[in-house]
Amino acid sequence: MENIVDRLDEFQDQIDELLGLVSDDKTSGLAEILPTISEMVTSLLTLYSQAHNKEIKAETDLLLVFKAFVKGDPSLNAVRDNVREIVYYQNCLAENREDALPSNPERMAVRTVQHIYFYLRSRLEQEELLD
């Protein structure tokens, strides 16, 4: 498995790139970046689980990934609302309900994945799992 610190650094680079895109209004909207963000959240949850020797079955449904991620450690529910926010954005786009999105949903989505990243990285540091 690739070094966990290297993978986390790659996530930080991706987040920085997305922050640059949304700050400079260089995206065509949430639909453009949401698949990347969803994939990043899934990968972050999976990476954290792998660091704890817990395998998560490959899923495309983010809520199923989260359910497997949190199983056995209720303290991981700390990111539940963030994961649900990403799923809410997916549902709004799928149902053509852009009117139900918050203002600047692109920035909100990037900040949400950034929050999940910071939370999981800090837990890994506190658990001394970053070598």
Image (cartoon, grey):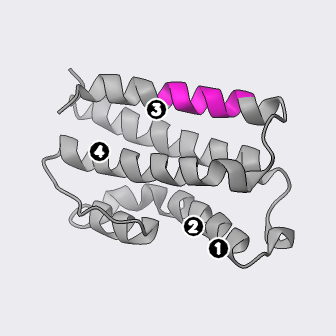
Question: What amino acid is at disc 1?
Answer: Asn
| Nearer-the-camera pick, 17 or 84 | 17
- Residue wearing tag 2: 87
Q: Earlier in the sequence, mark 4 or mark 1?
A: 4
Question: What amino acid is at disc 4?
Answer: Tyr
- Residue wearing tag 1: 91
- Residue wearing tag 3: 11
Question: What amino acid is at disc 2?
Answer: Val
**Cβ–Cβ under 8 Å for marks 3 and 2:** no
Residue 72: image location, x then y, percent: 20, 65
Residue 120: image location, x then y, percent: 39, 41
Residue 38: image location, x then y, percent: 52, 54
Kindly state the secondary structure of the residue where label 3 is placed: helix
| Nearer-the-camera pick, 23 or 60 | 60
Q: Which residues are magenta?
A: 12-20
- Say above or below: 13 vs 95: above
- Say above or below: 38 vs 127: below
Residue visible at 40% across and 62% down in the picture: 77
- Residue wearing tag 4: 48
Residue 54: image location, x then y, percent: 16, 54
Residue visible at 79% across and 50% down in the picture: 29
Q: Is residue 9 magenta?
A: no
Which quarter of the rendering shows the C terminus? top left
Kindly state the secondary structure of the residue where label 4 is placed: helix
**Cβ–Cβ under 8 Å for marks 4 and 3:** no
Kindly state the secondary structure of the residue where label 2 is placed: helix
Residue visible at 81% across and 34% down in the picture: 26
- Of labels 4 and 2, the one closer to you: 2
**Cβ–Cβ under 8 Å for marks 4 and 1:** no
Q: Earlier in the sequence, mark 3 or mark 2?
A: 3
Q: Earlier in the sequence, mark 3 or mark 1?
A: 3
- Of labels 4 and 3, the one closer to you: 3
